[in-house]
Amino acid sequence: MDLAVGASPYSVAMGDFNGDGHLDLAVANGGSNDVSVLLGNGDGTFTPARNFDAGLGGGPLWVAVGDFNLDRKLDLVVANSSSDSVGVLLGNGDGTFQPAVTFPAGGTAPQSVAVGDFNGDGNPDLAVANYYSNNVTVLLGDGRGNFGTARVVQTFGTSMSPICVSAGDVNGDGKADLAVCTVGVSAVTVLLGDGRGNFGSPQTFTFAGDPESIAIRDFNGDGKPDLAVANDDTAGTVAVLLGSGDGNFQPAQTFQVGGSNSESVAAGDFNRDGRLDVAVANAGSNTVSVLLGNGNGTFQAAQVFAVGTKPEFVVAGDVNGDGILDLAVANLNSGTVTVLLGNGNGTFGPGSLTTLSVVLAGTGHGTVTSSETPPQINCGTTCSASYSTGTVVTLTAQAAAGSTFAGWSNCDTVSNTTCTVTMNASRSVTATFNPQGVALTVMKAGTGSGAVTSSETPPKIDCEATCGAASASYDSGTVVTLTAAPASGSTFGSWSGCDTVSGSSCTVTMNASRSVT
């Protein structure tokens, strides 16, 4: 199931943003400088994306979730690469977010942001990997949604550019540490936190590959955190470094993922055997690979699933409430998020999409738009769109000048110009527009008698003695021809008020109400 989001989605995060108990999605769109929020329906389907600006300058590449003002409503933070900032969007608790407030990242081209309490005050803080300035910075939170001046906690050499940062307690002292992946020199650097916002000397672990993303989890079941690293190399690999529990790690073991250019890794128990597995997004092969864990830090051969174009990020969570982990994948080049529903055995299947089509009927003119922001249906221009199964779509008809809206067909409910449909299957609805009627009145003058008839069959105007009060309604723009026939003993004199006259015939174009005599 592919869901439309903004331009160039780089990353995706999950959280319950409207407090309904269902997981929702937040997507950082680097190309459109915004964050797309898709609210989950609890059955694996989502409402259409609503976009929120990521802050002045934008360029968001990474989105993370936390409660930064401690109001029990989830907030968002994005790493804005183009503006060298982090943007904080405080949640309203209903799936909407306040305008982004930006804070300088303390470096250039921030690529990644991690959330953790680094100084032990109970307030979420931020750690940022800044690519071009070769440093990692920390911004301490005040618990009200604000963050202090960024402080550099690690500077790398010019050949080591940090591209990702993850937070976790890797030495078991109850204090948040950082794991940073660098390119140029392919390595993971571990920075041990002291619980006061400071970090110790770096411990660097090198291996073959081009690391892009880190997951900190216990892959061999010894109670000590390990590292899984996605490598953006042509072969496509994930490196696993087993932890010693003191902040040190064993040499990396590398596993083939069956794809190329692995950009992101997520961990979870996808086959419900109590052992952690990994999912890897492969940008070069447009796939996600799932490697089932053996429980000892090794993994079985990859199973590969097709997704959108150039998948950059994968995240795991139960989006349909069946107790089985599912996957959401941000596809950079197709501007979509692919949702893969887990089967509970380590395999995944796509969710379902339905198509809503709008047909414009009648001889009038008008438009139909859907209610989401921005609307997926804007007909005249775009008259069909894909929606997740179960989505409730509201359509509104607007008649153009000179036309009237006549009605809907095939809706679930109708209220005046509004049509509501529930997308349990593909649907087609019809909106009918008719031209507004304009009146043609025929007056009679003189002392003779006779009849006047209009040319359509049957004639709308057919009068003799009643011609003085005769009128009929015509669609705007209709050309009407009237013919006068004198009665016995009378003669036809002339017409007035016509556009053209030919003998006893009068022609009028009904661009407005008219009266002829």
Image (cartoon, rainbow, N blue to C red):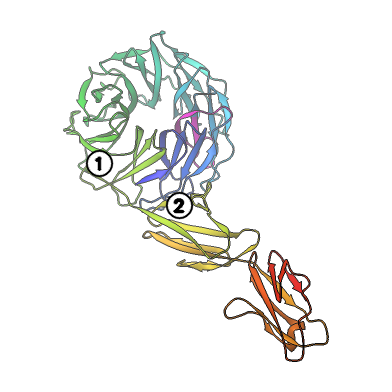
Question: What's the magenta region?
Answer: 56-78
Quarter of the image with the C terminus in it = bottom right
Residues at marks 2 and 1 touching, judged by CB atoms closer than 8 Å? no
Residue pointed to by mark 2: 20
Residue 315: which disc?
none
| Amino acid residing under circle 2 | Asp
| Residue on which the image places disc 1 | 270
Q: Is residue 318 above or below residue 61?
A: below
Comparing 153 with 194, the one in front is 153
Q: Is residue 157 left or right of residue 56?
A: left
Name the foreground residue: 457 vs 199.
457
Q: Residue at x 74, y 83 (%)?
A: 467
Q: Is residue 146 visible?
A: no
Query: 10 Å neighbourhood of mark 1: few (<14), some, or many (≥20)?
Result: many
Q: Is residue 208 left or right of residue 84?
A: left
Residue 123 in sight from this viewpoint: yes
Instruction: Judge whether residue 60 is colored magenta.
Output: yes
